Amino acid sequence: MSPTSKMTSFLLALASALAALGATSSAHAQDAAQGKKKAAMCIGCHGIPGYQASFPEVYKVPMISGQNTEYIISALNAYKKGERKHSTMRGIATSLTDTDMADLAAFYHQYGVEGMAPAPETAPPPSSPDVAALIAKGACVSCHGANFSKPVAPNYPKLAGQHPDYLYAALKAYGTEGNPQVGRANAIMGAQVKAFNHQELKAIAQYVASLPGEIRTTPAPKFR
């Protein structure tokens, strides 16, 4: 078995185990209508197309309309626990109950994506052989799916079409240690990104961002 095949098998096994844990922790009732009422705290950043965060690094805030519900819940819990370091997001997440998170996730999963075409079943190959080699080395599709929009576990994110600068910042964060402002604790991603330098991570991010996806930024609704 090749090193890539061994890595793929390991990632799939670990993904299944972590997905089971994630499913257990996110099993709450979801009410999209309630989520719409609670999203006022989110629209200032996630409801403005192209809006850029300025701390701790400048990058476009991620598109979350159409994102997996379980992933949104998982991410919010990670911010709440400090496993993802981001002062603004942690402040918001710590104010949310499990029900709040489930409602917000349900709202954003369906918000503004009606009528969108699903992503193709497989992503087009990278135009560069070097990038293709990086994707293979990271065994990216083993967790995030052949089209980067159908991950193997529902608490993993859809990545195709996401902002490249955000993806790059997120990848770097998984490999950052000892920084009180930046970092993400994740056993799978932490091990993966350490095999790449920053230029290679940027190349991966740009390829994934170029793919047709199922997420978007939807302008904020009018709340009454």
Image (cartoon, rainbow, N blue to C red):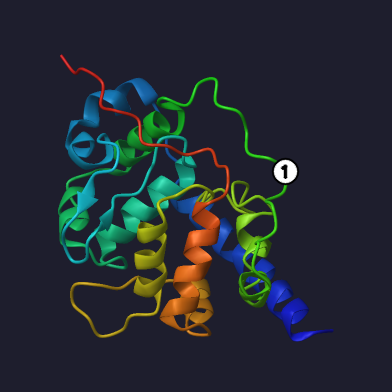
Q: Quadrant of the N terminus?
A: bottom right
State the image coordinates of residue 139 (x, y, percent, origin top left). Answer: 66, 71
Q: Secondary structure at mark 1?
A: loop
Q: Is residue 159 above or below residue 81?
A: above
Residue that numbered label 1 is attached to: 121
Amino acid carrying mark 1 in the image: Glu
Most foreground residue, 189 or 153: 189
Residue extending furthest toward the front? 127
Q: Is residue 64 above or below residue 156?
A: above
Residue 18 lies in quadrant:
bottom right
Residue 59 relative to residue 16: left or right: left
Most foreground residue, 13 or 207: 207
Q: Is residue 140 above or below residue 20?
A: below
State the image coordinates of residue 49 (x, y, percent, origin top left). Answer: 29, 37
Residue 134 relative to residue 79: left or right: right
State the image coordinates of residue 32 (x, y, percent, origin top left). Answer: 38, 25
Residue extending furthest toward the right? 1
Residue 140 lies in quadrant:
bottom right
Most foreground residue, 170 or 83: 170
Q: Quadrant of the C terminus?
A: top left
